[in-house]
C-alpha cells in the first residue's frame, strides 16, 4: 500500500518541515473576515517595491493556519489543530498545513523561528 503525499515534508535532507515553527512577518498586515477567511497585505521588498504591497485572500483553513502561525506551534501541531477544527475536510491535516505554510513562505508572509 502506498501513501500519497501532496507535497514534500522535507525542505532539505537535514530539516523536517513538520518540526518548524512558522511565525507571521511583522510587515504583513491582515484582516479576518466573518466567514473565517483572511486578507493579507504583504509589503513589497526588493525590486517588487515598484509594484507596491500585494493582497492575498486565504480561505477559512488558510486563514486559520495564518492565525496559528505565531511561532509557538510547529507545522505538525498546526495540522493537529486543523484536524480538530475542520475534521476530514483537511485530511491529511499535516500535509494540508505544510502546503499552506510553504505557500505563505513563498509569498514572504511567514518566516520560521530559529
Image (spheres, grey):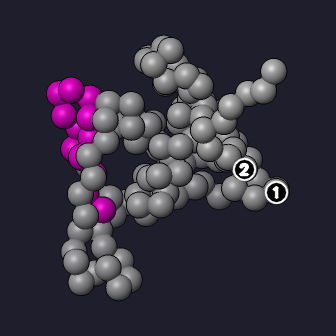
Is 111 magenta? The answer is no
Q: How many marks?
A: 2
Give the quadrant of the C terminus: bottom right
Q: Could you say where residue 79 lies in the image, as x and y percent from the top left? A: 56, 29
Label 2, secondary structure: give it. strand
Which residue appears at 26% of the width and 35% of the height? 37
CA distance separating discs 2 and 1? 7 Å
Residue at 24 percent of width and 84 percent of height: 50
Give 21 or 91, whichever is nearer the viewer: 91
Q: Which residues are magenta?
A: 31-42
Q: Could you say where residue 94 lies in the image, as x and y percent from the top left?
A: 60, 31
* Foreground residue among 89 and 71: 89
Q: Position of residue 85 (x, y in %)?
A: 44, 17
Residue occupying image coordinates x 38% and y 83%: 46
Any part of residue 112 in sight:
yes
Using the rendered view, name the quadrant where residue 67 is placed: top left
Q: Secondary structure at mark 1?
A: loop
Is 38 magenta? The answer is: yes
Q: What residue is pinned by disc 1?
A: 13
Can residue 73 be seen? no
Image: 57 above or below 11: above
In the rendered structure, the answer to whether residue 105 lies left or right of residue 6 reads left
Q: Which residue is mark 2?
A: 10
Q: Residues within 10 Å of mark 1 (few under 14, many from 20)?
A: few
Q: Nearer the viewer, residue 16 or 2?
A: 2
Q: Position of residue 26 (x, y in %)?
A: 37, 60
Residue 89, by quadrant, is top left
Q: Are marks 2 and 1 in contact (CB under 8 Å)?
A: yes
Amino acid at each position: 500500500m502506498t501513501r500519497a503525499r501532496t507535497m514534500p515534508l522535507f525542505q532539505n535532507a537535514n530539516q523536517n518541515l513538520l518540526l518548524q515553527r512558522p511565525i507571521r512577518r511583522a510587515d504583513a498586515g491582515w484582516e479576518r473576515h466573518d466567514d473565517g477567511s483572511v486578507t493579507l497585505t504583504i509589503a513589497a521588498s526588493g525590486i517588487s517595491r515598484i509594484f507596491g504591497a500585494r493582497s492575498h485572500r486565504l480561505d477559512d483553513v488558510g486563514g486559520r493556519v495564518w492565525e496559528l502561525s505565531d511561532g509557538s506551534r510547529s507545522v505538525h501541531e498546526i495540522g493537529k489543530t486543523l484536524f480538530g477544527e475542520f475534521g476530514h475536510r483537511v485530511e491529511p491535516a499535516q500535509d494540508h498545513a505544510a502546503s499552506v505554510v510553504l505557500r505563505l513562505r513563498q509569498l514572504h508572509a511567514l518566516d520560521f523561528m530559529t
